[in-house]
Image (cartoon, grey):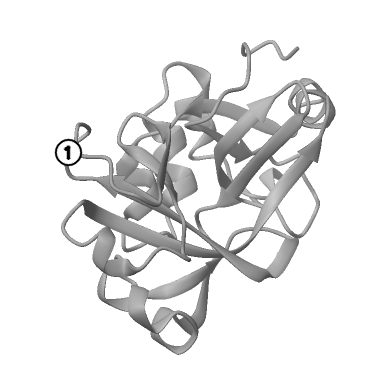
């Protein structure tokens, strides 16, 4: 298990400078599921140029700005999943599965009308990030990921270019300092 405690849904994984996999360089990943069998998440800071309306037209009315698909990760990039935020935690509509608090997964096969008015935000991801049993814990232990608390605003913010820096900046101690570290310290 990682030094930073047990991994759980709702946390963010922030790529450290040690992580060289091009799929995850400077990535911020929202964990949607984590248990002894593995983990699943979506990359929050990789918008694509593909409008939601061109792929999932009914959901474009509900999608948060920018209304584009986000590249959620390298696994199943031809598939889509959606993360939504409930307006009211006590009003859970058909087609919504809670992940953490009011944050959850939205079944895109559900008629959008059944969720109308229940969601304050929605983001659609093409693909996801997945790890087998123990794989993510090993990556955290080797220093590839910072594990930090997530906030709904991280998932649905319109501008994601500074997401990694902003998430690190609000952390206590050394992680706040890491937010200002240049990509290549030798160029400093």
Q: Is residue 152 left or right of residue 22?
A: left
Question: Residue 79 vs residue 151: left or right?
Answer: right
Quarter of the image that includes the N terminus:
top right
Look at 36% across and 51% down and name the residue there. 84
Residue at image coords 57%, 37%: 31
Residue 178 at what x, y percent from top left?
54, 32
Height in image: 29 above or below 51? above
Identify the element where label 1 is drawn.
Answer: loop
Q: Residues within 10 Å of mark 1 (few under 14, many from 20)?
A: few
Choose between 80 and 71: the one closer to the eye.
Answer: 80
The residue drawn where x is 64% and y is 68% is 79
Report the number of numbered marks.
1
Q: Nearer the viewer, residue 15 or 48?
A: 48
- In the image, farthest residue toward the bottom: 54
Please tell me which residue is depicted at 62% across the width and 21% down the height of the picture: 7
Q: Position of residue 145 (x, y in %)?
A: 68, 33
| Residue 174, above or below 15 | above
Q: Nearer the viewer, residue 179 or 3?
A: 3
Q: Is residue 129 among the parts visible in the rendering?
A: yes
Asked if 147 appears above or below 82 in the picture, the reply is: above
Regarding residue 63, the answer to whether it shows in the image is: no
Q: Position of residue 29 (x, y in %)?
A: 57, 44
- Residue in the foreground of this view, choosing between 27 and 125: 125
Side (left or right) of 37 relative to 102 = right
Q: Which residue is mark 1?
A: 88
- Residue 172 image offset from top left, x and y in percent: 41, 18
């Amino acid at each position: 298990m990682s030094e930073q405690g047990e991994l759980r849904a709702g946390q963010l994984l922030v790529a450290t400078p040690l992580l060289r996999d091009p799929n995850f360089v400077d990535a911020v990943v929202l964990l949607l599921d984590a248990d002894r069998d593995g983990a699943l998440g979506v990359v929050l800071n990789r918008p694509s140029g593909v409008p939601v309306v061109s792929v999932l037209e009914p959901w474009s009315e509900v999608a948060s700005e920018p209304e584009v698909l986000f590249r959620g990760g390298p696994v199943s990039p031809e598939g889509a999943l959606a993360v939504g935020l409930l307006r009211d935690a006590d009003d859970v509509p058909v087609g919504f599965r809670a992940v953490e608090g009011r944050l959850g997964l939205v079944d895109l096969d559900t008629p959008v009308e059944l969720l109308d008015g229940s969601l304050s935000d929605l983001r659609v991801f093409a693909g996801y990030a997945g790890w087998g049993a123990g794989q993510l814990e090993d990556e955290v232990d080797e220093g590839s990921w910072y594990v930090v608390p997530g906030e709904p605003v991280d998932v649905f913010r319109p501008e994601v270019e500074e997401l990694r820096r902003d998430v690190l900046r609000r952390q206590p101690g050394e992680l706040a300092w890491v937010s200002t570290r240049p990509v290549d310290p030798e160029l400093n």
